[in-house]
Image (spheres, coloured by chain):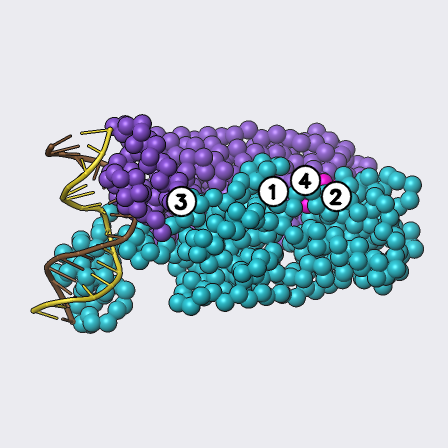
Chain colours: A cyan, B purple, C brown, D yellow
DNA sequence: ATGAAAGCGCTAACAC
DNA sequence: GTGTTAGCGCTTTCAT
């Protein structure tokens, strides 16, 4: 490994000058700088991030706290965060809290302490202790999806997504509407599932429509689970004419179930999701779109700004818009 | 931030003793160790990874070089790698090479130099220069999917997946078989697309079946692209009775296209994919399964072993088995 | 404009 | 068993 000392020797100056020259600081003559750069390139010199961090106290690493890394919403956020910060020479350290299907890891001090300059929390429901940890450490924190007092956040209006979905169906004349996507594990998914579920109930009430017993199904937020739920729904005597799924992945599960049950979509069953997952357009799924990458970009920018700023972090809450994408899985009621 | 010195003062010993005590080394009396531990806990002490790295020369960070982070195959690998190394107190640094739809970043010296202890390369086709870089840096490297001389690898027999798929269809009596998943950008996807495509042609030849002009479709390895390709296929006079897709995501795209074109599956069209994507079982997609998480676990274990070993890395090439999963999208030919 | 030297927080070699 | 001390590779005063 070539060190700064090697470069210094090769260019006949001191390490201090090399440091200045390479970082583009003042008080280095043009000729010296050229010489140093030459030597550095020659020797393939890269400053040790470790040593730089030790002296500067900054790691240029952002911790991304996430309940999953292999689900679309989360991997898309992670991807977009990385792309937003790479240009500022920052890196992503994965802080994956997934442990097993029914348990998650706690965010602990040794995961973040002296390791990261800031944290982006992706839609997990943090325990009090975990929040205290980040606060104690004075780590600038921005959340995506959830909100916590004292921290900046970027999100969509989750209730509104489902309200929009219900209103779309109501406008099509549907009255028999079921909902898939209530939640089993709030600590893994944050407040979003509850918000969407509550919004469903409220929107139905606002439309003076009944919410049938058993038509608000629990689900573990996966397509497979949603398929099972939908099959239950379809196997009963009285069937809904439309289903609102709290995510597109679940909506696809419902679509698959409908296919299997021989229900024509949308003639006999309308389906609407939330997200605009890449497969939504492929399957012609009507959905309420959210811009996941934009949320990641905003959150990253806010975090980097806070880290760079000498002032105490300003708390801002950004709510990004969503958009109804009418495609082929929703249609007028009463054609079955 | 509390440092080792704080702990030393609090427990009335030297920093050296604190260091030994906390790391469970010999030559520390039980009582002293207890006192140090007590103080450390009290003060919420966590050793600075930065300082430790500087002196040890090891970062306990593994770089994961990937062409995408938000696609199923890659995010699943990343997730599984993280879970395999977290127990050994190692972390994942994302080295995301995705830049824009049609270009990727180069792996550069400053991404890895002095930053990571080893690298897992996920199915990217590295340029000569990038390989030389990793070799120069003497970074232990394990690849998943691709193989390179001199590096250990974990993969499946990509050709065999497609051969299995073709043979399954042939056994069902199909003779008019199309293929979706040839490749546009080898540098982004590695050798896999070509291997699968070649295997298709060979398997057809072995079965004495013709490969029709235009029935080996290019695709950018996404469901959306596959849908477009499939629609082209379906719009022609002569239609295949079966389609082999090089991935499940593409197979789902074909399925969506079939739905749209009003083709009954599997009566009028059989579809088979590769992967066993979570949505494959949901949609009843017949596929050739690969165990992505197992590949990640093996590769991680090999890499960690190499890093820990004082000996020069042994090069091993592991090939994991695949398995035909017959579901509902394939059926006998000639029922359309 | 440049250099000498202190120090970031820790580990390891050596002394006692 | 425990302490002293010399670095690890950089940045940053402070001299000159």
Earlier in the chain: of badge 4 and badge 1, it is 1
Label 2 sits on a secondary structure element that is: strand
Circles 4 and 1 on the same subunit: yes
Residue under mark 4: which chain is it in? B
What residue sits right under mark 2 in the picture?
A: A218
Q: Secondary structure at mark 1?
A: loop
Q: CA distance from mark 4 to mark 2?
A: 22 Å
CA gap between label 2 and label 1 equals: 34 Å
* Spot occupied by residue B54 in the image (x, y as percentages of width and height): 28, 46
Q: Are marks 1 and 3 on the same chain?
A: yes
Q: Which residue is mark 3?
A: B44
Mark 4 burial class by Cα count in 10 Å: few <14, some 14-19, many 20+: many
- 3D distance between C-alphas at marks 2 and 3: 40 Å
Q: Residue at x 86, y 39 (%)?
A: A235
Mark closer to the chain start, 1 or 3 = 3
Q: Earlier in the sequence, mark 4 or mark 3?
A: 3
Q: Which mark is residue B280?
A: 4
**Disc marking residue B246:** 1
């Amino acid at each position: 490994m070539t060190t700064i000392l090697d470069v210094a020797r090769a260019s006949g100056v001191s390490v201090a000058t090399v440091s200045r020259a390479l970082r583009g600081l003042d008080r280095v003559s043009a000729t010296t700088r050229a010489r140093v750069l030459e030597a550095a390139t020659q020797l393939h010199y890269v400053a040790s991030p470790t040593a730089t961090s030790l002296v500067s106290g900054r790691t240029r690493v952002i911790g991304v706290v996430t309940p999953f890394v292999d689900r679309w919403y989360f991997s898309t956020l992670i991807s977009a965060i990385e792309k937003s910060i790479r240009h500022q020479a920052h890196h992503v350290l994965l802080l994956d809290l997934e442990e097993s299907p029914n348990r998650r890891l706690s965010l602990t001090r040794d995961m973040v302490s002296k390791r990261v300059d800031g944290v982006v929390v992706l839609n997990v429901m943090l325990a009090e202790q975990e929040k205290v940890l980040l606060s104690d450490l004075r780590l600038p924190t921005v959340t995506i999806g959830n909100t916590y007092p004292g921290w900046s956040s970027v999100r969509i209006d989750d209730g509104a997504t489902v309200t929009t979905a219900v209103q779309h169906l109501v406008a099509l004349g549907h009255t028999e509407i079921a909902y898939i996507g209530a939640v089993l594990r709030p600590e893994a998914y944050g407040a979003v599932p509850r918000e969407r579920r509550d919004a469903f109930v409220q929107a139905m009430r606002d439309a003076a429509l009944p919410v049938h017993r058993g038509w608000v199904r629990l689900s573990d937020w996966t397509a497979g689970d949603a398929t099972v739920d939908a099959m239950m729904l379809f196997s009963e005597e009285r069937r809904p004419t439309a289903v609102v799924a709290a995510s597109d992945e679940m909506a696809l599960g419902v679509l698959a179930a409908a296919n299997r049950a021989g229900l024509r979509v949308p003639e006999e069953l309308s389906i609407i999701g939330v997200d605009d997952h890449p497969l939504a357009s492929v399957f012609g799924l009507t959905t309420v779109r959210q811009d996941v990458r934009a949320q990641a970009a905003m959150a990253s920018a806010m975090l980097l700004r806070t880290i760079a700023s000498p002032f105490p972090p300003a708390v801002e809450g950004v709510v990004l818009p969503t958009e109804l994408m009418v495609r082929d899985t929703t249609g007028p009621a009463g054609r079955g």
